[in-house]
Amino acid sequence: MIKQVDNPPAQDTLGYDPLEKLLRALYERGYRFVTVTPTTHRLVNERPENAWAKTLQDIFGWNRPFTQASIDADIFELMHAAAVLRAVDDGWQSLVRVSSVADKLFVHSGFPTEAQDAVFFGPDTYRYINAMYHSLATLQGKVQRCVDIGTGSGVAAILLAEALPYAEIYGVDINEKALAFSTTNAKANSIANVYFQYSNLLNDVQGEFDVIIANPPYLVDPSARAYRHGNGPLGAQLSLDIVDAALTRLSPGGTLMLYTGVAIVEGHDPFLEEVKQKTKEAGCTYQYSEIDPDIFSEELATDAYARADRIAAVWLLVSRPTIEADNLLQLISTVAEP
């Protein structure tokens, strides 16, 4: 379990690793940055005046090259100690980026996210968190145990742990770099009730969960990058696998909160049709809504989406009935039998 601390201490406090110290130092300097789509990131950086970094946001947000003279000496030393510096012609570049959500900072992979073990953060992250907060307000009863599948930078697990300080929160991933970043992010943000561990879906964690949350990869990626490739002909297989896992591991009254992207083909939503069948067979209910009707439109030019009308960002809530409700349904079903 991560040790609880109060306000972020000075950057030279003993006991914190260099990357955590770096995040705390950026926090102390009022650093904030909203991470944009890769396309927007590239277009903004291509402007001639943005060739070199001038601010901390340029260095850790836009990930532009910088000279040592243009950066706080303490920050440069922390970057060196954390091994997140890369030498480039006439200067340096950060190997990581730092994004803000509310009053918290999160470290994730540098731009562009081309490596197989890249840890992604972007507009999907913000939509996911906003939807999670909205749904948390509708939960009934006390939540005691939660898990974030494919936790990535750990942002959802950390914010969920903050919102539910009495609950035990797990963040699981198959990416060791993601687990390292998420652990650092939790420590730097002084969140104690969260655990990060390796798990393929829920295969390596035990027990039932009151809340299961996930923002899985959902695109068809020719390079099969773990943070992006959702498997299946339209990228939806991993999202469906998460639904299957949740249906067997939700506690009575528990809820799955899933943010994903789905390909709409000739006006038809094949992912939703699968969800309807799966939840019906499991005796669960669902709520489903489109958060954004048109995302990643550039993917429509690829062969995988040759028949797709659009890719939509959707929010799925799956609820398992309480024991009392389940017993009542069984009683009604029995009485109704001829």
Image: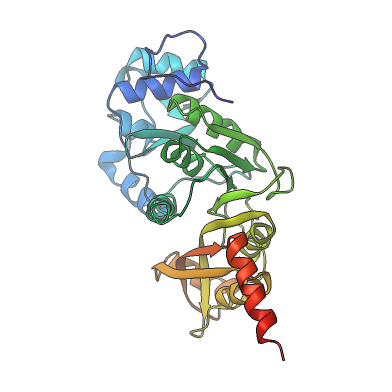
Q: Is residue 111 visible?
A: no
From the viewer's perspective, is residue 9 above or below residue 118? above
From the viewer's perspective, is residue 13 above or below residue 196? above
> Residue shown at 45%/25% (left/top)?
188
Determine whether, in the image, residue 44 is placed left or right of residue 189: left
Q: Is residue 144 visible?
A: yes
User: Horizontal and vertical percent for residue 99?
Assistant: 39, 38
From the viewer's perspective, is residue 221 above or below residue 46? below
Towards the viewer: 54 or 7 = 7
From the viewer's perspective, is residue 34 above or below residue 180? below
Question: Which quadrant would the N terminus be assigned to in this image?
Answer: top right
Towards the viewer: 222 or 92 = 222
Question: Which quadrant would the C terminus be assigned to in this image?
Answer: bottom right
User: Horizontal and vertical percent for residue 125?
Assistant: 44, 50
User: Horizontal and vertical percent for residue 149?
Assistant: 60, 48
Q: Spot the residue most to the bottom.
A: 338
Q: What colouring method underlies this structural image?
A: rainbow
User: Horizontal and vertical percent for residue 220?
Assistant: 60, 64
Q: Spot the residue most to the front.
A: 335
Towards the viewer: 284 or 155 = 284
> Residue shown at 72%/43% (left/top)?
206
Towards the viewer: 124 or 308 = 124
